Image (cartoon, grey):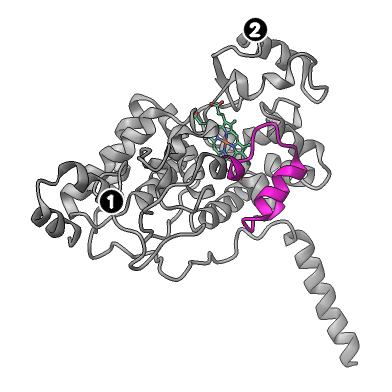
C-alpha cells in the first residue's frame, strides 16, 4: 500500500516534471547574499526611474543602443563577474578588457551612456550606486524597452579594482564559431544549464553583427546548415570575408525583443554558428522549438537566466568600491587629479 501510493506520487511528480525538466522559469529567483531587491530603496529611491527615463530618450533616438547595452552587461558578467571591469580603461599594468578581440565590437556609445547615467544618478544620490549595478539595470531596461519582459534586478554589486587580461577575457567569451558542445561546456563552467544557454542566446533577437563574425560560414565554402537565400543575401552584404559591414542578428524583427530569433533558427537563418547549431544539436533543438512557439516561456526562461548571469562572481559588502567614474578606479583618478596627500586621503575615505 505504502509503496503503491509512493509510486503514484512519484508518477505524478514525474509527469509534472517531465514538462518542467527543461524549464524552471517560474521558480522563485535566488538572490546571493549581499545583494537585495531593495538595496537602494533608502539611499537612492529614484535610481530606477532616473535610468529608465533617460534610456527612453536614448532609445527613442536610436533603438540600436539597447542591443549595445545588453551585450555590455553580458561581457561584464562573463569576465571576472559583474564587477564593471569591462568599463575600465587600460592602465600601466596592461591593456584593459576592452582591448580583447570580442570586446572591440562593443559599442563606444554604450560606455558613454553608462557614464552619463552614472553622472545623473550620482548627481541625485551621491556616490552610492555602483557602475556594475547601473550596467545591470540598463540591460534590463534595454530588454524591456525593446518589447521584452520586465524584471526586477537584485542590486548591491560593488565595482572591481582590477580588470582581466586579454587572454582571460578571450577565454571567458565564447567565439561565434563555437558549436553547441563548446557553448554548453563553456557555460556549464559558470553553472548554466542547456536551457539557460538557449535562453541567453535569445539576446540575439536584437542588434547587429559584423561580417567577420560570420563570414567563416560563407567563404571559402558555404555552411550547409544555412538557408541558401539567406546565405546569398549575406554574401551581398559581405562581398569578402573581411568586409567591415554589419547586418542584423534577427532578420524577422531586428529591433524588437521577441522570440523570432528562434523562428530564424528553425528556418536556418541564424547568423552565427553558435546560434544555428542550437537547432542542429539534438540536446538543444527541442528548447529552440519550444521558445519559437511560446514567447511567454522564452521570456520566463530568459529572465531566470539573466538574473543568474547578473549575479556571477559579484563583489558585495566592503569588497571593491563604488566608482566615481566608471572608466577608472577611484585610486587611479586620484593619482591624476589629486594635488597633494591631504586631498587624496579625504577623497579615498569618502
Ligand atoms: C552564448 C554565446 C554568445 C556568443 C558566441 C555571442 C557572440 C556575439 C557576436 C559575435 C556578436 C556580434 C559582434 C559583432 O560582430 O559586432 C554578438 C552581438 C550581440 N550579442 Fe552576443 N554572443 C553570445 C551571447 C550573448 C548573450 C548571453 C547576450 C545577452 C543576453 C548577447 C547579446 C548580444 C547582443 C544584444 C548583440 C548585438 C550588439 C550590438 O548590436 O551592438 N550575446 N554576440
Percent of width and height locating residue 293 = 70, 41
Percent of width and height locating residue 27 = 59, 65
* Rendered position, 217 above or below 32: above
Percent of width and height locating residue 232 = 72, 10
In terms of image quarters, where does ligand 1 lie?
Answer: top right
Q: Residue at x 20, y 49 (%)?
A: 122
| Residue closest to the eye, 81 or 259 | 81
The region drawn magenta spans 170-194
Mark 2 sits on what residue? 239
Quarter of the image with the N terminus is bottom right
Q: Secondary structure at mark 1?
A: loop
Question: CA–CA distance between discs 1 and 2?
Answer: 44 Å
* Rendered position, 2 above or below 143: below
Examine the structure image and report whether residue 175 is included in the region drawn in magenta.
yes
Mark 1 sits on what residue? 323
Q: Residue at x 46, y 33 (%)?
A: 99
Quarter of the image with the C terminus is bottom left
| Residue closest to the eye, 234 or 7 | 234
| Mark 1 crowd level (few <14, some 14–19, many ≥20, 10 Å Cα) | many
- Residue 155: quarter of image: bottom left
Q: Is mark 1 within 8 Å of ligand 1?
A: no
Q: Residue at x 73, y 32 (%)?
A: 276
Amino acid at each position: 500500500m505504502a509503496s503503491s501510493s509512493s509510486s503514484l506520487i512519484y508518477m505524478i511528480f514525474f509527469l509534472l516534471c517531465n514538462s518542467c525538466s527543461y524549464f524552471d522559469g517560474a521558480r522563485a529567483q535566488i538572490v546571493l547574499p549581499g545583494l537585495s531587491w531593495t538595496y537602494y530603496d533608502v539611499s537612492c529611491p529614484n535610481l530606477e526611474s532616473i535610468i529608465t527615463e533617460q534610456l527612453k530618450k536614448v532609445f527613442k533616438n536610436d533603438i540600436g543602443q539597447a542591443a549595445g547595452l545588453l551585450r555590455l552587461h553580458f561581457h561584464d558578467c562573463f569576465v571576472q563577474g559583474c564587477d564593471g571591469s569591462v568599463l575600465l580603461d587600460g592602465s600601466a599594468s596592461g591593456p584593459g578588457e576592452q582591448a580583447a578581440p570580442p570586446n572591440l565590437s562593443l559599442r563606444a556609445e554604450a560606455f558613454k551612456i553608462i557614464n552619463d547615467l552614472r553622472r545623473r544618478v550620482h548627481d541625485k544620490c551621491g556616490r552610492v550606486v555602483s557602475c556594475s549595478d547601473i550596467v545591470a539595470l540598463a540591460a534590463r531596461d534595454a530588454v524591456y524597452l525593446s518589447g521584452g519582459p520586465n524584471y526586477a534586478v537584485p542590486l548591491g554589486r560593488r565595482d572591481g579594482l582590477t580588470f582581466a587580461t586579454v587572454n582571460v577575457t578571450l577565454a571567458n567569451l565564447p567565439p561565434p564559431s563555437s558549436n553547441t558542445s563548446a557553448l554548453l561546456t563553456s557555460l556549464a563552467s559558470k553553472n548554466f544549464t542547456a536551457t539557460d544557454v538557449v535562453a541567453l542566446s535569445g539576446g540575439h533577437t536584437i542588434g547587429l553583427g559584423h561580417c567577420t563574425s560570420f563570414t567563416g560560414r560563407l567563404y571559402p565554402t558555404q555552411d550547409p546548415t544555412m538557408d541558401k537565400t539567406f546565405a546569398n543575401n549575406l554574401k551581398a552584404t559581405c562581398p569578402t570575408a573581411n568586409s567591415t559591414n554589419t547586418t542584423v542578428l534577427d532578420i524577422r524583427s531586428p529591433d524588437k525583443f521577441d522570440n523570432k530569433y528562434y523562428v530564424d533558427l528553425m528556418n536556418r537563418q541564424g547568423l552565427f554558428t553558435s546560434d544555428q547549431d542550437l537547432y542542429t544539436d539534438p540536446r538543444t533543438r527541442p528548447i529552440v522549438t519550444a521558445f519559437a512557439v511560446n514567447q511567454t516561456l522564452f521570456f520566463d526562461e530568459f529572465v531566470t537566466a539573466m538574473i543568474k548571469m547578473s549575479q556571477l562572481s559579484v563583489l558585495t559588502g566592503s569588497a571593491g568600491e563604488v566608482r566615481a567614474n566608471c572608466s577608472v578606479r577611484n585610486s587611479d583618478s586620484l593619482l591624476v587629479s589629486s594635488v597633494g596627500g591631504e586631498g587624496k586621503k579625504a577623497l579615498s575615505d569618502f
